[in-house]
Amino acid sequence: MRAVRISIAVAAVAVASTLVATAPADAHTTRKTSPATTVLTTAIGAPFNLDVRHGRILVADGAGQIGAVEADGSVSTVVGDVPGASGIATSRNGKSMAYTTSVVEGETTITASGLVITGPKGTIQVDTLAYEQANNPDGAIQYGVTNPDSCVTNTLTNAGFPVSYTGAIDSHAYSVAAYHGGWVVADAGANALLRVSRSGKVSTLAVLPAHPTAITQAAADAFGLDACAVGVTYAFESVPTDVEVGPDGFLYVTTLPGGPEDASLGARGKVFRVNPYSGRAVAIASGLLGATNLAFSRGGLYVTELFAGKVSLIRHGRVSSFLELPGALAVEAGPRGDLYVATGIYGPPSVVRVQTGGRGWRH
């Protein structure tokens, strides 16, 4: 169950206009027990993704644009009127760019979703919702509870949880990465990675596995479930929020757990390593509270934990806290190994540069 459908994106689209700053804040740096940080801009609304390449810092701003962070802290419009902007990537040679869009009806229903590719040959519009309607990649995956008895069925139904179901028709093109001359889209509605060719042809690269969670007594109390639900395993959806190409050529994906995305059922976010040839996805880290974005830098894998308000470092499957940063939403690696972190939604909107190898700081 995706209780509030990747709620961070939908909520931001609705309120982004109230979040946009009118002027950049003065840059400041801190060098104590944490990595050195510099605020580059606050003139943004809902910075879901960054692209740091070819001398530019691009922001996919849920306020409705693809913007570029300027040296004076302002943000110039690269592409305007982009509904539901959440993903941005540029090709390795810098000649092409791709960004995701979505149109929300009401609070949760996405009526249009896709990828826009711009380059030397013009603009290509890719309709991921149409692909989902024709193929439904996770349509064979079973979610909810297997063989529930009548007590479990009744208590889950009364609490608003679907008891047992398979993947529904749903597309939310959320993040995008350049890959082998084309693109890979993390579709948070389809629960899948989609491969998009340079010409705009779509195919399924991988489907994320279900996310099983045992219902604890605390969870039952929190949601008003009867005692018969305690100990029952509920298979939630794995909702991909970001995709990056790792140094080994495999794809790495952050996921939010379907259902409550916050801490009400515990820290359940994961990072998957996906074989781009077989589509096999293996979880390499778990226990993350709101895993919304990831980046590789200086041999480390960094993940934003939105609901924990921090950036974490993952090495050899072990997760450690790297930087406390309220509203940490997106992270990207820069050309010299520094990190660029966007904050917003549950913290003041900003883009911050973080020195991963600065003086006075060691991993």
Image (tube, rainbow, N blue to C red):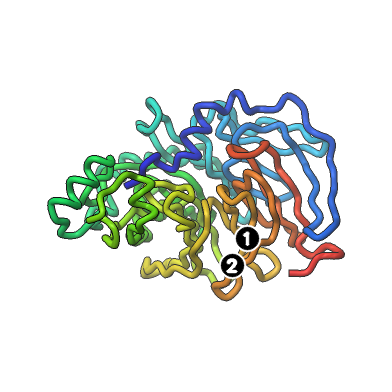
Badge 2 or badge 1: first in the primary sequence:
1
* Mark 2, other Cα within 10 Å: few <14 / some 14–19 / many ≥20: some
Q: Quadrant of the C terminus?
A: bottom right
Which residue type does callout 1 highlight? Ser
Q: From the viewer's perspective, is residue 225 above or below residue 346?
A: below
Give how far apart the Cα atoms at labels 2 and 1 are. 7 Å
Mark linked to residue 312: 1
> In terms of image quadrants, where is residue 172?
top left
Mark linked to residue 319: 2
**361 or 263, nearer to the observer:** 263
Measured as percent of width and height from the top left, residue 214 is found at 33, 61
Residue shown at the point (37%, 39%) measured from the top left: 127
Is disc 2 in contact with disc 1, using a CB cutoff of under 8 Å? Answer: yes
Which residue type does callout 2 highlight? Val
**141 or 79, nearer to the observer:** 141
Asked if residue 216 lies left or right of residue 67, the reply is left
Measured as percent of width and height from the top left, residue 275 is found at 43, 69
The kind of secondary structure element at disc 1 is: strand
Asked if residue 184 lies left or right of residue 59, the reply is left
The kind of secondary structure element at disc 2 is: strand
Determine the residue located farthest toward the left in the rendered image.
150
Asked if residue 353 lies left or right of residue 246, the reply is right
